[in-house]
Image (cartoon, helix red, strand yellow):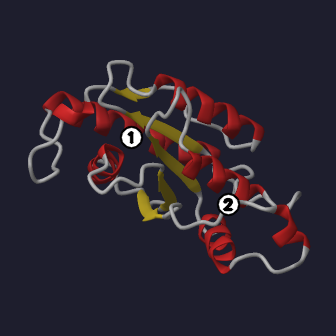
């Protein structure tokens, strides 16, 4: 029997018709059966404030989030680009999960970053900025293939399904590479 790895999926866009959410659904459907996905929502996390941890009464949303991430083997991020960086939702999630100091739920989890944008450069700045944080958090990020998905507003049909054949092919290739990365890097 093959090992099944649980992957937290974090989508940084809160928009109702989010291209990142559409792409996250499409790519998880293209993944090999060795990966099982849990979408972990970040939009409702209160902003990180160390005082709440120091007082021993962190918000329930933080506790639930930390528990959800801790129970997974790896993390797959989908990020839009805002001002050449990741959105505040992802940065806040990284902060909440990395605290209190010495108790990071991110430590050692293999990760991958997919940036999705209607623009031509596919969220390059956000992708690399997020990768920089992952390195600090000791989350080995998948190196190749990289996923900067530009022109994303033209990849989906009216029902939200991924209709672009070359993107489906790339998505399957990326998810297979990620499955291999997870299998190689998970420490159980």
Disc 2 is placed on an element classified as loop
- Distance in Å between CA atoms under marks 2 and 1: 34 Å
Please name the residue shown 46% across and 33% down the image.
81
Disc 1 is placed on an element classified as helix
Q: Is residue 27 visible?
A: yes
Please name the residue shown 49% across and 26% down the image.
144
x, y percent for residue 30: 28, 47
Q: Nearer the viewer, residue 6 or 23?
A: 23
> In the image, 134: left or right of 126?
right
> In the image, 16: left or right of 125?
left
Choose the circle earlier in sequence order: 2 or 1.
2
Mark 2 Cα within 10 Å, few/some/many (few <14, many 20+)? some
Q: Nearer the viewer, residue 103 or 124?
A: 124
Mark 1 Cα within 10 Å, few/some/many (few <14, many 20+)? some
Question: Residue under circle 2?
Answer: 47
Please name the residue shown 66% across and 66% down the image.
70
Residue 54's label in the rendered image is none
Farthest-out residue, left: 158
Question: Residue under circle 1?
Answer: 176
- 2 and 1 marks in contact (CB < 8 Å): no
């Amino acid at each position: 029997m093959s090992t099944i790895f649980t992957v937290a999926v974090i989508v940084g866009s809160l928009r109702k018709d989010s291209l990142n959410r559409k792409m996250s659904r499409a790519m998880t459907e293209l993944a090999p059966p060795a990966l099982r996905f849990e979408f972990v929502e970040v939009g409702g996390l209160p902003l990180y404030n160390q005082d709440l941890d120091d007082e021993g009464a962190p918000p329930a949303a933080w506790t639930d989030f930390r528990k959800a991430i801790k129970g997974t083997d790896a993390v797959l991020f989908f990020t839009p680009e805002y001002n050449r960086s990741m959105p505040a939702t992802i940065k806040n999630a990284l902060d909440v999960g990395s605290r209190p100091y010495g108790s990071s739920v991110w430590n050692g989890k293999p990760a991958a970053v997919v940036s999705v944008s209607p623009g031509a450069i596919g969220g390059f700045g956000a992708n690399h900025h997020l990768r920089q944080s992952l390195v600090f958090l000791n989350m080995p990020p998948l190196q190749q293939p990289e996923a900067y998905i530009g022109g994303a507003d033209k990849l989906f049909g009216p029902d939200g399904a991924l209709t672009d054949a070359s993107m489906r092919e790339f998505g399957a290739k990326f998810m297979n590479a990620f499955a291999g990365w997870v299998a190689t890097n998970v420490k159980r």
